[in-house]
């Protein structure tokens, strides 16, 4: 590990916060992507259902 001296706690805390923020953004992106795909699938199914009924 790097020798950080008296700044060790501050630097490691900043790294930790950064990792948590990045992981949170990835999870949020995946969650929103899943919601958007589900909404698109529902829209496509309702559109296909409407065409078949005509």
Image: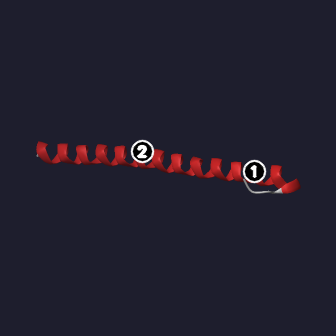
- Mark 2 and mark 1 residues within 8 Å of each other at the beta carbon: no
- Which residue is rendered at x = 86% and y = 55% of the image? 5
What is the tally of numbered marks visible in this picture? 2
Foreground residue among 31 and 21: 21
Foreground residue among 26 and 43: 26
Foreground residue among 10 and 20: 10
Q: How is the image coloured?
A: secondary structure
- Which residue is rendered at x = 42% and y = 44% of the image? 35
Is residue 36 found left or right of 12 in the rendered image?
Answer: left
Disc 1 crowd rating (10 Å Cα; few below 14, some 14-19, many 20+) is few
Q: Position of residue 29 (x, y in %)?
A: 49, 51
Is residue 2 found left or right of 6 in the rendered image?
Answer: left
Is residue 5 found left or right of 39 in the rendered image?
Answer: right
**Residue bearing mark 1:** 12
**Residue bearing mark 2:** 35
Foreground residue among 44 and 1: 1
Disc 2 crowd rating (10 Å Cα; few below 14, some 14-19, many 20+) is few
**Earlier-in-chain disc, 2 versus 1:** 1
- Which residue is rendered at x = 82% and y = 49% of the image? 9
Q: Secondary structure at mark 1?
A: helix
Q: Which residue of the protein is positioned furthest toward the right in this rendering?
A: 6
- Which residue is rendered at x = 35% and y = 43% of the image? 38
* Residue 11 lies in quadrant: bottom right
Q: Position of residue 22 (x, y in %)?
A: 60, 52
Q: CA distance from mark 2 to mark 1?
A: 34 Å
Tell me the tag on residue 23: none
Foreground: disc 2 or disc 1:
1
């Amino acid at each position: 590990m790097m020798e950080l001296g008296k700044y060790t706690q501050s630097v490691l805390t900043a790294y930790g916060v950064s990792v948590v923020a990045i992981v949170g953004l990835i999870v949020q992106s995946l969650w929103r992507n899943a919601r958007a795909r589900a909404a698109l699938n529902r829209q496509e199914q309702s559109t296909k259902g409407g065409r078949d009924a005509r």
